[in-house]
Image (cartoon, rainbow, N blue to C red):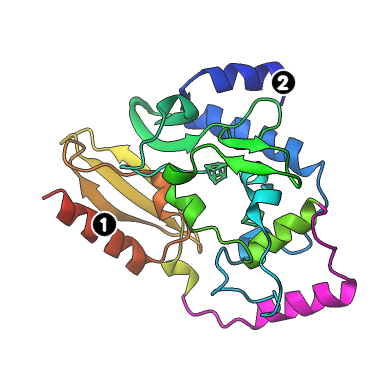
Amino acid sequence: MKANELVQITRTNRLSEGEFYSAVNGMFESIWTKLHPPQVLLEELSNTVRGNVITPADTEIPECLSCGACCASLICVGVRPGEDGDRSDQWEIVSDSDEGLVVDVFLKRDHETLACTALDGVVGETVACRIYESRPSMCHHFEAGSDRCHAIRRAYGLEPFMSLAEMSAAVQKLKAVPERISASKIIRNAKIERDAENGKLLISALAKDGTIFPIHSYDPDAETWRQFEFDGLTVEEADELIRTRSKKSE
Ligand code: SF4
Ligand code: SF4
């Protein structure tokens, strides 16, 4: 992605899904071509220490204040309804087919470093989060010491690369994790669309096996949802999330 395009994008607060994901692709390429390959697919790795599969239990937990690698490289940091923060730091993403419909909110990226706009300092040296106290829950849930944390640190050269034998053992361990939930019950992405007949909004889910099914219909004056909130959830987890928030709005 050209530098001047990103400058323009960081000056705007509203992007269509098409504009946003094209910018994400460009940023992803610019960031990851400068890093070491992650060795193991990041999507397969846990964000929590409790969910670790490949990191030995006695591995030291790294110090975030001298790292910042995840804040610099994980591009889509979603802001849930109620985590409003400073709107000038955020992109509102509107539906490609309905520009009045905000379907997601993400933290902006710095147009020079491509890191999260709230990250101060130099990755791998000294960093700080400018909005630490009010950072999105997505950041809270990303744990230092998790498999994914270590993988990103290796990509930045902040931890030694895995040897071929270690890499092979990691792949075997990931393969050995029993598939607890069928792919038809895990949501890959969700889509929010307006029902032209009654004005309600409908959330549909795309499952990992490619099936599409409706998960919630709601009145936009009573509830607010973002598409990213459903990424990676099981159908049961999505139901529970919807039940809890719908109850609060009653
Ligand atoms: S990659 Fe890990 S250690 Fe580094 S900032 Fe993120 S959570 Fe902290
Ligand atoms: S909000 Fe803070 S913790 Fe979250 S990605 Fe940005 S700099 Fe990192």
- Please tell me whether residue 168 belongs to the stretch shown in magenta: yes
Residue indicated by mark 2: 3
Quadrant of res 213: bottom left
185 relative to 102, above or below: below
Q: Which amino acid does label 2 sit on?
A: Ala
- Identified by mark 1, the residue type is Ile
Alpha carbon of mark 1 to alpha carbon of mark 2: how far?
40 Å
The residue positioned 78% from the left and 54% from the top of the image is 155
x then y, percent, for residue 109: 59, 32
Q: In the image, is residue 138 above or below residue 185? A: above
Per the rendered image, the range of residues in magenta is 157-181
* Residue 151 visible in the picture: yes
**Residue beneath label 1, please?**
242
At 65% from the left and 62% from the top, the residue drawn is 148
Residue 205 position, x and y percent, is 39, 54
Q: Is residue 49 left or right of residue 58?
A: left
